[in-house]
Image: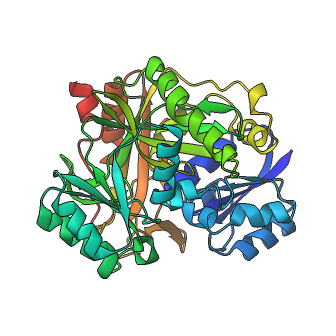
């Protein structure tokens, strides 16, 4: 029996905790800082995910046998390196390996060097040079901040003025801070967007089910980018043959390239893809589970997540079989009024006990106040349902979303609609 520490407090981490809690290998689960939802099935610790020393002390004090890091920021800050130096088993890539997410320029250079299919691009550290370059490019173009930007650092510019505004926001106004020290200007790919994640111990690569997420706040992909407003898995247009293809031309080569470059990669590798007429192209890599994709994928995992993660940490993933349900899953994010802009916290959430017993409600921005669950973030909940088909899962989840209420709540009404109508 083992004790596990999960770092993070979003719906992704709640989903990970929920799945780990089903393992017979687990004795206790601690979550730092967690949410009102994780507090019902694990022990929350009031430790910020960026407090690496505090997390290391907690791992020692609570005799943690496995730490699972959810968010990208502590990974980029080197939490895995620190835990390795203290002899604490941890699931996730090192700081150097996390560069595949924390630097878009690093990832692009890696892909170009090792022949991993991706969009053409140029990197700039000068606003003036970037502006002059984009003036000569076909539009639309994609403007990306080099560093971490909470999933909001990529802007599709459909005119020269929009491109200049994006460059100015990133490089002059510094809306993403130091993440905007450099930018990538990419060709805009056309096709269907999908995410394919994989478990890897640095040698063996085991892909998960594909998932599609919705980044813009409004129905019909209108409004500003968010951290993600919903997801579904698996999309019908991305079958077993495509999973195998992307594993062979993207995931395995990326893991091998990182090893060759002296940055062996272990944990979850996330490939954001555009399926174009010419084949799949990588939009971005992430160094961890996606959010909200995780909420739609892990409920379909039939294997023991703790066993998989231990196999990754112990470099024996080649001896693990990972199996998945034949069902489909749809997740809908319920957000605070004003999100992704400014919003208020502290509103009571009602209806959480009214959802069907087979529906999962994963907490993101919530906390418990005087025995009552209240809002405490922009993305508040992800409501998730399974079904024999995407259509069945979609109908089931929306039937339950309407039972939950908090002041200012909003959510997209079209999650997985394109899959059902296709």
Q: Where is residue 383 in the image (x, y as percent from the top left)?
A: 41, 46
| Residue displayed at 48% across by 37% down | 116
**Number of numbered discs overlaid on the protein picture:** 0
Residue at the farthest top position? 241
Residue 56 visible in the snapshot: yes
Residue sitting nearer the eye, 338 or 237: 237
Which of the 4 image quarters holds residue 60?
A: bottom right
Q: Quadrant of the N terminus?
A: top right
Whether 89 is drawn above or below 276: the answer is: below
Residue 342 as seen in the image, left or right of residue 36: left
Colour setting = rainbow
Q: Position of residue 339 (x, y in %)?
A: 30, 67
Residue 341 visible in the snapshot: no
Residue 90 as seen in the image, left or right of residue 265: right
Which of the 4 image quarters holds residue 407?
A: bottom left
| Residue displayed at 36% across by 38% down | 397
Q: Where is residue 266 in the image (x, y as percent from the top left)?
A: 69, 46
Whether 330 is drawn above or below 266: the answer is: above
Residue at the farthest bottom position? 173
Residue 163 as seen in the image, left or right of residue 3: left
| Residue displayed at 44% across by 53% down | 352
Residue sitting nearer the eye, 292 or 287: 287
Residue sitting nearer the eye, 96 or 6: 96
Residue sitting nearer the eye, 72 or 138: 138
Q: Where is residue 197 in the image (x, y as percent from the top left)?
A: 53, 38
Q: Quadrant of the C terminus?
A: top left
| Residue displayed at 75% across by 75% down | 53
């Amino acid at each position: 029996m083992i004790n596990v520490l999960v770092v993070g407090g979003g719906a992704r981490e709640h989903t990970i905790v929920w799945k780990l809690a089903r393992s017979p290998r687990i004795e206790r689960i601690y979550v730092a800082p967690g949410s009102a939802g994780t507090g019902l099935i694990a022990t929350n610790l009031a430790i910020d995910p960026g407090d690496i020393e505090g997390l290391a002390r907690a791992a020692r004090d609570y005799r943690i046998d496995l730490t699972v890091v959810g968010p990208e920021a502590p990974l980029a800050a080197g939490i895995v390196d620190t835990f390795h130096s203290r002899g604490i088993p941890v699931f996730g890539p090192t700081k150097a390996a996390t560069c595949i997410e924390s630097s878009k320029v690093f990832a692009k250079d890696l892909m170009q060097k090792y022949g991993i299919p991706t969009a053409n691009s140029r990197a700039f550290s000068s606003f003036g040079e970037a502006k002059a370059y984009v003036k000569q490019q076909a539009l639309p173009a994609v403007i990306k901040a080099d560093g971490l930007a909470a999933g909001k650092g990529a802007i599709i510019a459909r005119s020269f003025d929009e491109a200049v505004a994006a460059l100015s926001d990133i490089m002059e106004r510094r809306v993403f801070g130091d993440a905007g020290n450099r930018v990538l200007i990419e060709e805009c790919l056309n096709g269907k967007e999908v995410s394919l994640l994989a478990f890897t111990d640095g040698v063996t690569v085991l892909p998960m089910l594909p998932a599609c997420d919705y980044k813009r706040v409004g129905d019909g992909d209108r409004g500003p980018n968010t951290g993600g407003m919903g997801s579904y898995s698996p999309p019908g247009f991305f079958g077993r043959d495509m999973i195998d293809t992307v594993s062979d031309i993207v995931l395995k080569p990326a893991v091998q390239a990182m090893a060759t470059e002296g940055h062996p990669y272990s944990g979850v590798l996330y490939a954001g893809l555009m399926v174009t007429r010419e084949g799949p192209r990588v939009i971005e890599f992430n160094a961890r589970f996606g959010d909200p994709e995780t909420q739609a994928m892990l409920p379909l995992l039939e294997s023991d997540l703790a066993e998989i993660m231990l196999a990754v940490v112990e470099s024996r993933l080649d001896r693990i079989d990972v199996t998945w349900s034949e069902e489909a899953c749809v997740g809908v994010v319920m957000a605070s009024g004003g999100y992704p802009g400014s919003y208020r916290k502290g509103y009571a959430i009602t209806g959480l006990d009214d959802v069907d017993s087979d529906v999962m409600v994963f907490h993101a921005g919530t906390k418990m106040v005087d025995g009552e669950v209240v809002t405490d973030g922009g993305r508040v909940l992800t409501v998730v349902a399974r079904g024999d088909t995407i259509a069945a899962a979609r109908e089931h989840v929306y039937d339950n979303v309407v039972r939950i209420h908090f002041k200012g709540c909003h959510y997209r009404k079209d999650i997985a609609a394109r899959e059902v109508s296709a």
